Amino acid sequence: MPGIRRTVGRVRSERHRRRLLFGLPLALTVVVGGGLAFADVTPTPPPVTGATAAPTNWGGVTTQTATNAPSMTSSSVIAANISLSTVKLSSAFSYLSPGGNGMPQWTPTVTAVAPNGTLEVAWQAANAVHVTPVDRWLHRTGPDTVVTGAHEIGGLVAFNDGFALLTRFADHNRWGETAAELIRVRDRHVVFAVKLTGPASHDTAPMLDGRLSWNGSRYAAVFTVHGAGGSENGRWGDKMVYVDDSGRMLPGGRSWGCRGDAGRTLGWSGSSAAYNCYDDGTAAGSALTSGDDMVQAGNGSWVTALSSLGPVSYRKNVLTWKITPRWSTDQAVLFFVNPAAHSARSVVLTSTPGTQNVNVHVAPYGRTALLVSWESVKHGTFTGTHFRLVDLSGRFLTPDLVLDVHISGTITVLANGDLVWAFVRQTPVYGHRMSRWPTVTSLFLARLHVSLTGTSASPTPNPTPSMTRPPTPTTTPMPTTSPTTMPSLPAAPSTAVGTHF
């Protein structure tokens, strides 16, 4: 497109928003007091142009504390089924980066699986995003594709022949801020690179905190925008756009929505995308990552994981909720929405006074359970990464398990149901600002084999398909407390320089 030029290797190539239709369109959008909140009241949303208004006859959203399921299993079902591999990096990776207020948070690593079972792992280097190809056994299969000048990984979709990346680049505008851009790479060539913000829409994207999804025919992207002219000049919001497979922007979406400083979730409701946004009530973003995963469970319900100070009290105006914090520190919460039954409820997973529970993640564990993870922080000091299995009612299936395996980005579901994510072998620093940001030159890929079977309360996963050769990246079972060192891990293939554009 005019004004955009990208290079791949030696070849140069030119190159609706729908509020969540499950009855809580604004329930998770705004919070005060430095933490997220969730709704235990049902709002009546204003009409949204080009989108169907959410139902308003749902009644109150219930909140309950998680309890143990009638049949529990040992936490070793998690620890004994995690295998690790290493991927040596071609450039230094700064695994911590400043949040909106300058406090450290994990630099996200994003993993996506292609239809053929191969994976792409995206990570941020200094002035470039690297995308590393990995096979189903978590081995590097070739050099990185390096997107020079890219800042931040807003979202990643893997294909058999490449990937699509939501990112941002330097731009010319009144604020001197970056612009959001969607790039499609096929066979190491840029198919298209389309700017999603600019003078025509009076917006910039100095940070993304985004999500990207593909439904087989079009992309949906949601990300932070900053008004640069027009009626929203100087204000913060979010934007959702649709793009087809040729890079053409499609009608629908939304040009301006909630600020969503603390994160967003994105999924598909039929042919339209649906998302929630989470706002900490500031203009600068959240200090501790809240975690903002949304997955569809085996029973068709949608489950969102977040950290929160408690339910909202009432709606003050179109953008703001009144919140009287129920807890003094953020707690891990699962929010269940059943669109078929028009019901929603929240389940509180943690309750330790004085402990912050942040960086909450959730992923399907088979068809009848969920893997939930969060980090605990006490007096500004990281105290562990927690893992538990819960059933689709929010009841615990395993005891609390603390591992020295972190989750700093997306959890990817493989075709056989196994779960994969990338992480670094370091301890996060949450208690103070940093003048120098530490780096590593290796990533670790964790694979959790879904294996829990037995009672009716336990998940029954799909059988693991046969493989032509056994997975080689294995380790001893993970310890159930946080050790000072990690188990010895297998060596990775030598690192290639990569394809740059």
Image (cartoon, helix red, strand yellow):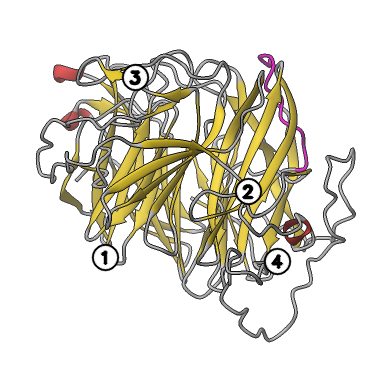
Residue of label 4: 139
Instruction: Tell whether label 3 touches label 1 (CB within 8 Å).
Output: no
Residue of label 1: 217
Q: Element at badge 2?
A: loop
Magenta range: 425-437
Q: Amino acid at mark 2?
A: Asn
Image coords of residue 273 (percent x, y): 27, 51
* Residue for point 33% across, 25% down: 259
**Figure quadrant of residue 383:** top right
Q: Looking at this view, is 1 or 255 the one in front?
A: 255
Q: Amino acid at mark 3?
A: Ser
- Cα separation, mark 1 vs mark 2, equals 42 Å
* Residue for point 40% across, 49% down: 6
Residue of label 2: 68
Residue of label 3: 313
Q: Residue 426: in sight, yes or no?
A: yes
**Mark closest to the chain's N terminus, 4 or 2:** 2
- Cα separation, mark 4 vs mark 2, equals 38 Å
The crowd level at tag 4 (other Cα within 10 Å; few <14, some 14-19, many 20+) is: many
Q: Amino acid at mark 1?
A: Ser
Which SS does the magenta portion mostly show? loop
Image coords of residue 76 (percent x, y): 78, 58
Q: Looking at this view, is 187 or 291 the one in front?
A: 291
**Mark closest to the chain's N terminus, 4 or 3:** 4
